[in-house]
Amino acid sequence: MLGRIWLFREQSLRPSGYKHRCPMSDVNCLLEQLTHDAIAAARDGQWDRVIGLYDRRMTQLHLNPIAPGLTQALVKWDQWLIARVRDAQAAIQQNLLEIQDQRRKLEILKRQWGGSSTAQSRHLLTI
């Protein structure tokens, strides 16, 4: 894979002692590329793509042996990705709580408007 473009450049996520050495077996290069693509997809919030890439990677892992140095790298990158998933879940949870609060406030307004005359309600809707 000459001229390979790295989608993943964060040095902090590369374990010490691991050096990318392609030509590894094609399977090892494929596993690494699938992981890098999944990380790039996670950065873009493309979680369905992340799942698809990890499904492909899991299939390859079950069928083929991998280089020991790559195993350490995959674990490190997986830990980074797990942290991003947790961040996304926390953000979604926060958004859901905010939506729930807004719905509660709308229900209160709806009940208040329901008790007033229709003329007054129409006036409030035009404001």
Image (tube, helix red, strand yellow):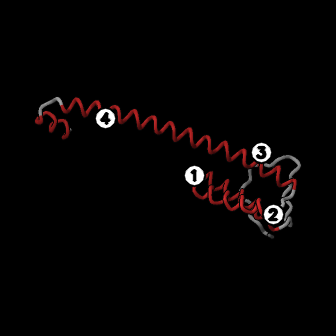
Q: Which sits earlier in the primary sequence, circle 3 or circle 2?
A: 3
Please give the label number shown on residue 106.
4
Residue highlighted by disc 3: 12
Q: Residue at x 16, y 35 (%)?
A: 121
Please give the label number shown on residue 45.
1
Q: Which sits earlier in the primary sequence, circle 1 or circle 4?
A: 1
CB of mark 3 within 8 Å of CB of mark 4? no
Residue highlighted by disc 2: 64
Residue 103: x percent and y percent? 35, 36
117 left or right of 20 in image: left
**Res. 53 image quadrant:** bottom right
Crowd rating for badge 3 (residues with CA inside 10 Å; few <14, some 14–19, many 20+): few
Vertical comparison of 5 with 51: above or below: below
Residue 82: x percent and y percent? 67, 44
Q: Residue at x 86, y 55 (%)?
A: 19
Q: Nearer the viewer, mark 2 or mark 1?
A: 2
Task: Tell me the distance, in whole angstroms, between the alpha carbons under discs 3 and 4.
Answer: 46 Å
Q: Residue at x 60, y 58 (%)?
A: 49
Q: Which sits earlier in the primary sequence, circle 3 or circle 1?
A: 3
CB of mark 2 within 8 Å of CB of mark 4? no
CB of mark 3 within 8 Å of CB of mark 1? no
Q: Nearer the viewer, mark 3 or mark 1?
A: 1
Question: SS of the residue at dot 2?
Answer: loop
Q: Residue at x 10, y 36 (%)?
A: 119
Amino acid marked by disc 2 = Asn
Residue 46: x percent and y percent? 57, 55
Amino acid marked by disc 4 = Leu
